[in-house]
Amino acid sequence: MQVNPAAGAMPASGIREIMNAAWGRTDVLHLEVGQPDFPTPPHIVEAAHRAMLAGHTGYTPTAGIPELRTALAGKIGNRNGFTVAPEQVVLGNGGDQALHATLTAMTRPGDGVLLPDPAWPNFDMMATLLGLPAAHYSLTAAGGYVPDVAELERLVTPSTRVLLLNSPSNPLGSVIGRERMSELLAFAAAHDLWVLSDECYDEVTFDGTMVSPAALDRDGRVASVYSFSKTYAMTGWRLGYVAAPPALAEVLTKVQEPLVSCLNTPTQYAALAALESPPEVLQGMVGAYRRRRDLVTDRLQELGMAAFRPAGAFYTWVDVSAGGLGAREFALRLLAEESVALAPGTAFGPGGEGYVRLSLAASEADLLEGATRLARLWHRLREQVPGGR
Ligand SMILES: Cc1ncc(COP(=O)(O)O)c(C=O)c1O
C-alpha cells in the first residue's frame, strides 16, 4: 500500500537527533529544548480543575467558547495593538495547528509560500503536507536577522500567495521593527499576498520593539497566530488562536470542524484564568529569560564568541563556524566531548549552517556552565583549523 509521498518524504527533526543521542545519559546539560522550564502557574491549573468539576467536559463551539474569544479580542486590542471582533478569533490546538489550519484556509495546492530560513522546521513540514512550493528568504547576521524586501522581490512569482513572518523568531530571537514591518506589508500589498504572522512569542520580548503586522494592515491581508504555550508555560495544554479578517475567520472556523471539532474544553477555561493573571506572573518569567539572555551572551562574548543578543523568544543563536565543523557535527561533538545538548542551526534550515541554538529554558547555573563548555570546544577546534588562530 502507498502512503502520501509528501508525508513520507518529510525530513526527520535535527533537534530530535541530538535528544536521542543524549537519551539515557544523566550527565548531560540540556540546552536543546524549546519549552519553558517553569510549571504552569497554579491558578491556571486550578481553573481547569474547577471547570472539570463543574461539568465543562463536553464539546464547545468549533471556534471556542464565546467568553474566551471575547477575552482574546480584548487581549489583542490591549497588547497587540489592533482591533478585532470576537468572531474574528478562532482557537487552534496550539499555535502549530492554528498555523496549519490558517495556511489550509488561505491556499490551494500549488500556491507558492515565502518562508524564512533559518526557521522553526514545522513551517516547511506544513507547506510539504499542503502541496505548497516554498521559496526561502534568508535571515542573516548581516541583515540583523530580519527579512530583506529586495530579496523577497527576487523570490516572489505570480503564483506566490503567502508571506510567512515569524517575529519574535525561533530560532533567532530577532524581532522585526515597525519600519521594516511597514515595508513588508507594502511588499505583500504590491503582490497581493496573504501575510501569515506567527507571533507565538509575542509576550516574551525584551526591548519593546515588537509590532504586529495586523496593527499596520490597511486591507485585511494579515492573519496573526498566538499561543498560550510560551507565554504561560502551557505547552502541553495545547492552545493557540488566530486573529483573522472576517471572511478568513469564517472559513477557518469551517476548516477547524473536520480537523479538531473543538479545543479541549477544560483548557479553554484555564485560558480564561491565564488571561486574568496578575502582571507579576508574566513579568517574573520574562524577567528570568532576560537575565539568562544577558548572562549567556555576556559570557560567550567574554570568551570570544559571536552570540546574537535576542530581542524576544528564549534562544541564543551562536556562530560556531570558525571551529571548522558543520553545525550538526559541532552539536554531536559538544554532546560527546562536553556533555552539552543543544540544537544545531541546520535543524532550522540550510541558513543555520555554522550556528547552534541554545535554549534559555534552563537554570542560570546550567546556562553559564553550558556556555563555558561550548566556548571550550570551539577554542579547541579553532586551534586545529589551519590558520585558525
Ligand atoms: C516559532 C513557533 N511558532 C509556533 C510554535 C507553536 O507552539 P504551540 O503549538 O505549542 O503553540 C512554536 C513552538 O515551538 C514555535 O517555535
Image: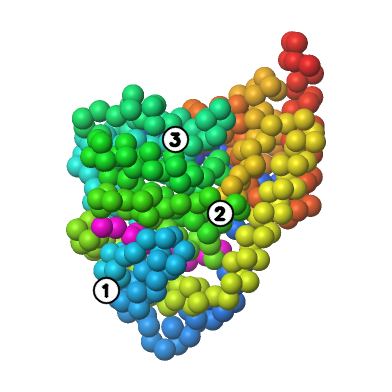
Label annotation for residue 208 = 2
Instruction: Give the quadrant of the N terminus.
Output: top left
Residue at (24, 48) in percent of width and height: 106
Q: CA distance from mark 2 to mark 3?
A: 19 Å
Identified by mark 1, the residue type is Pro
Q: CA distance from mark 1 to mark 3?
A: 37 Å
**Residue at position x 66%, y 66% from top?**
284
Camera-side residue: 153 or 321?
A: 153
**Residue placed at 78% from the left, 41% from the top?**
299
For label 2, the crowd category at 10 Å Cα-Cα, with few meaning under 14, some 14 to 19 and many 20 or more, is few
Q: Is residue 96 visible?
A: no
Name the mark on residue 147: 3
Tag in front: 1 or 3: 3
Quadrant containing the C terminus in the rendered view? top right
Tell me: is circle 1 under 8 Å from ligand 1: no
User: Which corner quadrant of the image does residue 173 belong to?
Assistant: top right
Vertical placement of residue 280 versus 366, above or below: below
Magenta segment range? 233-245
Q: Is residue 225 magenta?
A: no
Q: Position of residue 267 (x, y in %)?
A: 43, 72
Q: Which residue is mark 1?
A: 61
Mark 1 and mark 2 lie on one chain; the one further toward the N terminus is 1
Residue at the bottom extreme, as displayed: 54
Instruction: Note whether 159 is above or below 193 in the view shown.
Output: above
Instruction: Specify whether residue 239 is painted magenta.
Output: yes
Residue 302 at x, y = what percent? Answer: 80, 36
Q: Circle 1 sits in a helix, a strand or a loop, which is it?
A: loop
